[in-house]
Amino acid sequence: MSVSFAGLGVALATPFGRSGDVDEPALRRLVGRQVDGGVDVLVPCGTTGEAATMSEAEQLRVVGIALEESKGRAFVLAGAGSNDTKVAIARSRKMAEAGAHGILSVGPYYNKPTPEGFFRHFTAVAEASPVPVILYNVPSRTGSNIDAKTLLRLAAHPNIVGVKEASGSMAQQMEILRERPKGFLFLSGDDAVTLPLMALGAEGVISVAGNEVPGEMKSLVASAAAGDFKKAREIHERLLPLMNLNFVESSPVPLKCALALLGICEEVLRLPLWPATAATRESMRHVLKDLGLLS
């Protein structure tokens, strides 16, 4: 089976029960809803999944459930990053052993590496990983940006197959799209700019909104990939209020609020995250009603 991470990837939320443990039945419901909606790639244990406050055993269990419930209908790209290169290597190997088809490796946070530090970190991870690596650039979370020149250097590595780009810089993203080697995947890391980036040649998105509206996000991505930008634009405009609201507080706070309103899981987050404000909850209820997801 040829592995591809193009199309609609969904950065899965991790449902927690009132006890604080992973809510496995809710996670199975969430994953089933994704694959029924046509999602191409499941991305557990990332920022949206609150991986920073999960134990290694919990992360491996979540990846195992994603594999079990998807039943081969979607690829699993497991979050396995760390700001400690040795830890990132060990996590990558364990996720591959668990059955993940690839790993998503975030830029080291807090340390603020130099470009050469980024290059050597990701090269070490890629050379140790038994499965393909997708880089994740999200400076709003990590505190440092993987610049285009460094990213393009890394793109030459045979086991680094793509990037989830969430720098927020259209200039940087266009440079990567223009200069990347053939076959190197460019995935939007921000729902709201998926359509313009796909118009410039990106192959898809790793989406937060896909948790809530997997079928519509799949249609948006598929329409853009097919060159039907009229249909893609209509879906984009319909979903834009939800895309924006998902980030009005730190993600996945608004998302967990939405999933609770939809009856998929409890609105439980792990500290230091805290449930949404009353204003955000009311806005989310209104947006979900407008989308026909709540009566």
Image: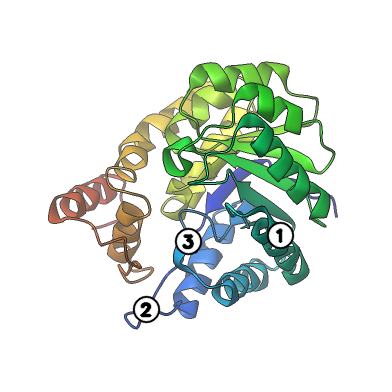
In the figure, residue 227 lies in which quadrant? top right
- Residue at mark 3: 52
Vertical comparison of 155 with 128: above or below = above
Q: Residue furthest bottom?
A: 19
In what element is the residue under mark 1?
A: helix
Q: Circle 3: is it few (<14), some (14-19), or many (20+) Cα within 10 Å? A: some
Q: Give the label on residue 92, or none.
A: 1
Q: Give the label on residue 20, or none.
A: 2
The answer to the question of whether label 2 and label 3 lie on touching residues, with beta carbons closer than 8 A, is no
Vertical comparison of 176 with 125: above or below = above
| Location of residue 270 in the rendering, given as x and y in whole percent from the top left corner | 35, 68
Specify the amino acid type for callout 2: Gly
Residue 263 horizontal side relative to residue 22, left or right: left
For image coordinates 76% across by 39% down, the residue present is 161
- Could you tell which of marks 2 and 3 lies nearer the N-terminus? 2
Residue 41 horizontal side relative to residue 286, left or right: right
Specify the amino acid type for callout 3: Ala
In the figure, residue 168 lies in which quadrant? top left
Give the CA distance from mark 2 to mark 3: 14 Å
In the image shown, does 8 or 248 lie closer to the viewer? 248
Q: Is residue 186 visible?
A: yes
The answer to the question of whether label 1 and label 2 lie on touching residues, with beta carbons closer than 8 A, is no
Residue 269 horizontal side relative to residue 85, left or right: left
| Location of residue 68 in the rendering, given as x and y in whole percent from the top left corner | 66, 73
Q: Circle 1: is it few (<14), some (14-19), or many (20+) Cα within 10 Å? A: many
